[in-house]
Amino acid sequence: MNIKFKKQDGLLLAVIMTYSYLFYEQHPGINVLIFNLIVIGALVISRPIKAVSPALWVTALGCLLSSVGVVVVNTDLAVFASFLSLILLLGYVLDKESSLFVSLLNATYSMLAAPFVYSVRYFHRRPDETSARPSLSQRLRLLRFGSLALPVLIALIFLSLYASANPVFSSLLEQIRFDFISWEWVRFTLIGTFILFGFFYTTQMESLTQWDDKQINDIVRTRRTKTQDFHPLALKFELKTGVILLLLLNLLLLVFNLADISYISGSRLPEGLTYSQYVHQGVYTLIVSIILAILIIVYFLRGNLNFHSRNRLLILLTYAWIVQNIILALGIAYKNGLYIEEYSLTYKRIGVFVYLFLALAGLLTTYTKTGSLKNHWYLLRRNAWIAYVLLLVMSLFNWDRIITNTNLKKTDNTDFKYLTGLSDANLPELQLLENDNRLPLTLTADLTHKRQAFFERTRSTGWQSWNYRDHKITYQLNDLLP
């Protein structure tokens, strides 16, 4: 074995031991931050990178930010963002120029397939003719394994015979216990070893990576030859089709937006349509409209139509349709805000805002694509990064407490059962409600059970699971409880 192999062995063993110590029978907390720092350091040592790409910097920063989010707000979203960031970091260590989604696929493939790939390579490798010491043949490796396994097997057979023949010896063996070995810990550590192996003995989908690296973001004009089955007027008719289609769609969306604006300005809803149905139907319409808008724009502006001398009207209609979809999205955001103000804040309604943000981002990048002659890979790459950064930002907020404090400001329509079903983050607020006799009696038992489960969880874990959220909740509950 060469020096590099020994260094990777040592780093892998150190990371596995750290993983086992930090996470076995623990909950996410400061252990996530410590582990991410150690893995980042180990990756830097094992695979020195001469030129660090912006994507590598962003994912490394994402690992740190999301793990800080785990320590401070301790939400499932922060834990997921931290795990995803670590996988993406591995993907960009493998290839610093890959797209975000290809990096995710490569890293996942490395974690799941590397143990099998390296096992196959080990048992089927051929002697290295360039090495001073040729590698062992498969037969010789089997002989070495047998030279150890055979004596152990025979010794176990004789051990069984001697135990059957001598009660005193059998009693002595019974006193030898292996209770100190936790098979749950062994299984936990083996699973971690399987996953972490791919961080240091990496493998990737080479063909996918090479193909992705060759994909550019710009639209390239292709010259048609006479030998191709292509009518010289086809591009002209495609331009005409695009103009007519976008003109009709702009008119339809204009009528829709005018009807929407008329309601927002004070008009009454149609008979039999509730406010909730109106908002949700608007969201579904937005989903279909924006997806179709982007797909149609990508189709018509995918190639040579971008370079047509008479495509000015098509471009203007494209811009108009994008702007109208943005107006539609802003209208839905406004109505969703009114709905929250009238009723309450929930994760589904937060999800509407998240989708609207991503939809607006998709429309704006489509607007940029149209004016800068970018292709569909540009859209996929940019919007993947926007979604990832949005995930990082959202992982830094304690949404359960935000939902609780927002809803408790309302004197009417407060869904206490929904608030009780959230995480432990809102325990102090619920306890204060119970102290003031504002919590329904039917939910006091649920709150008691939730509080007891929180104290039991925090007492059963070590320092590895410490986080600021639980520390603050414990301090507040001790002041509120009689």
Image: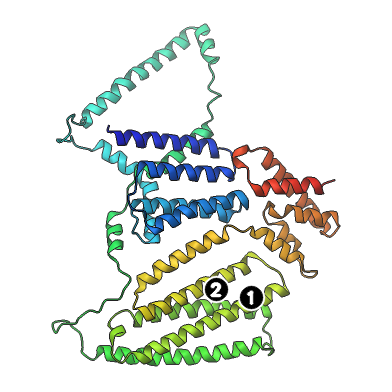
Q: Which quadrant: the N terminus? A: top left
Left or right relative to 392: residue 135: left
Left or right relative to 178: residue 446: right
Q: For residue 122, which quarter of the picture?
A: top left
Element at badge 1? helix
Mark 1 in CB contact with mark 2 (< 8 angstroms): yes
Sequence-first tag of 1 and 2 = 1
Q: CA distance from mark 1 to mark 2?
A: 10 Å
Task: Report which residue position mark 2 lands on.
Answer: 356
Q: Which quadrant: the C terminus? A: top right
Q: For residue 259, which quarter of the picture?
A: bottom right
Total marks drawn? 2
Residue at 77% from the left image edge and 48% from the top image edge: 477
Residue at 36% from the left image edge and 41% from the top image edge: 46
Compare residues 150 and 320 and report the one nearer the observer.
320
16 w.r.t. 232: above or below: above
The amino acid type found where label 1 is placed reads Asn
Element at badge 2? helix
Left or right relative to 364: residue 478: right
Left or right relative to 448: residue 340: left
Q: For residue 200, which quarter of the picture?
A: top left
Residue at 26% from the left image edge and 40% from the top image edge: 121
Compare residues 308 and 290 and report the one nearer the observer.
308
